[in-house]
Image (cartoon, rainbow, N blue to C red):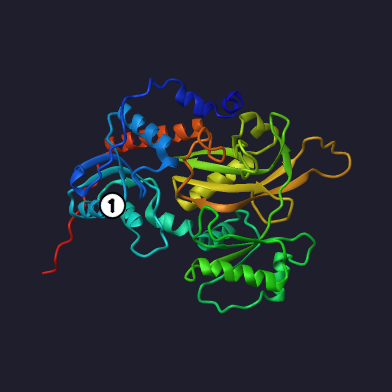
Amino acid sequence: MDRQRAGSQGVVNALRDLSAAVSSTLLVPRHPADLAEHYDLTLSHPAIDCVPFRAFEQWLAQAAARRGLTCALLHDGVVHDAIQRLASGRLTIGFHLDYFALWHVADDPYARLAQAVQDAGGRPVNPPVRSRMFTDKAAAHAELLRHGLGVPPTILIRPWAAERPLTPAERAFLRLDEPGARVYVKPANGFGGRGVVRTESTAPEAIARAVAAVRQHDRHDAILIQREVRCPTLRDDDGVERPAYWRVLWCLGEALPCWWTPEHAPNRPSYRLVTAREIRRCHLEPMLQFVRDLAALSGLEWFSTEVCLSTGNEPSRHVVWETVGWTGRREPPRRWPVVAIDYLNDQCDVDVQSRWPGAPPDVLVRYVAERFAEAAARQRRTPQATPVPLRRAA
């Protein structure tokens, strides 16, 4: 915890003065008849009791109660009625956190709920139209590339395209004939690693099998074939050599970076907060600026992204120069472009490390709960726009 405190003074300072936990619980309307006429803050996901959300929901409800706000969960049992009530003016919601919208699925109820909150004058944490666009990896890839933000070498296959092998030009672009080359094949609208196939072989038949497997995941989705990006290692404050790979949460204008690796062994955390000293010593400000630019480009207020430094030569307007141990006498310092691996996920992990080692640190999850409650309080102080009914033409 001391190590985390060193790298998260903003997080710790914001939590240090919190009063003792308020005796409050999340409101859970179990049936449509239980819905109130107004909630200041809502969270949505299908199940009433979802274990990975328990700590976050408790902290969110407590933070809301300290500010005099009502906080509720909207789930499968009430989501359709909530949409109807929002549309008819019988329900208003101030600030809404979506946790299950499938933006690419027609008539998805949780996507409709977020849109209904916005239409009724409330504020979803992310504008639905922006989430719909930027959680689609094919659309996001094109926008990042166009704005000079580093991305892996990628070939896009649209859902209407006939099955075919990669052309010689496409294979050359991905540098598939280089020794040790690897490829990830992924659906444009997958999340949580679902549907992603990694192939160790770059032979045409191996890539064809991977594409066919991903297409089975969703035949109506685009597919990305991406060359694996190799990243260098950097030494953290504890002297541990870590891959220069981070999962960064963007929360209401603030970047919260963590060193990130998949959980390989029992009780080995996947996340570790990056310290302020590490940012300075490893010259990581360009990595943070990359995330700020990604936020500005996407228009999203709440997302996670996975970014790394690359030992390749991917074009990126953000570059980290390695200077530790460089004498300047012979070779110039190494240049590592900042590259996004998993572009934007608008439903960030809020499980806690005390329950499962692969989850974010508890202090980080509690901090974002506080940020959301404060945003909901600001929203309540801002008069809501009253929707104007459409008039029939004479």
According to the picture, the residue beneath numbered tag 1 turns out to be 79
Mark 1 secondary-structure assignment: helix
Q: In which quarter of the image is residue 243?
A: top right
Q: Residue at x 41, y 32 (%)?
A: 370
Q: Quadrant of residue 239?
A: top right
Is 281 on the left or on the right of 16, as rendered?
Answer: right
**Amino acid under label 1?**
Val
Is 313 on the left or on the right of 139, as rendered?
Answer: right
Picture coordinates of residue 199 (x, y %)? 67, 62
Which image quadrant: the N terminus? top right
Picture coordinates of residue 47 (x, y %)? 36, 47
Q: Is residue 56 visible to the viewer in this orientation of the structure? A: yes
Residue 189 lies, with reference to residue 38, above or below; the image says below
Name, please, the residue furthest toward the right. 330
Picture coordinates of residue 20 (x, y %)? 38, 20
Is 175 on the left or on the right of 86, as rendered?
Answer: right
Q: Give the camera-side residue of 39 and 123.
A: 39
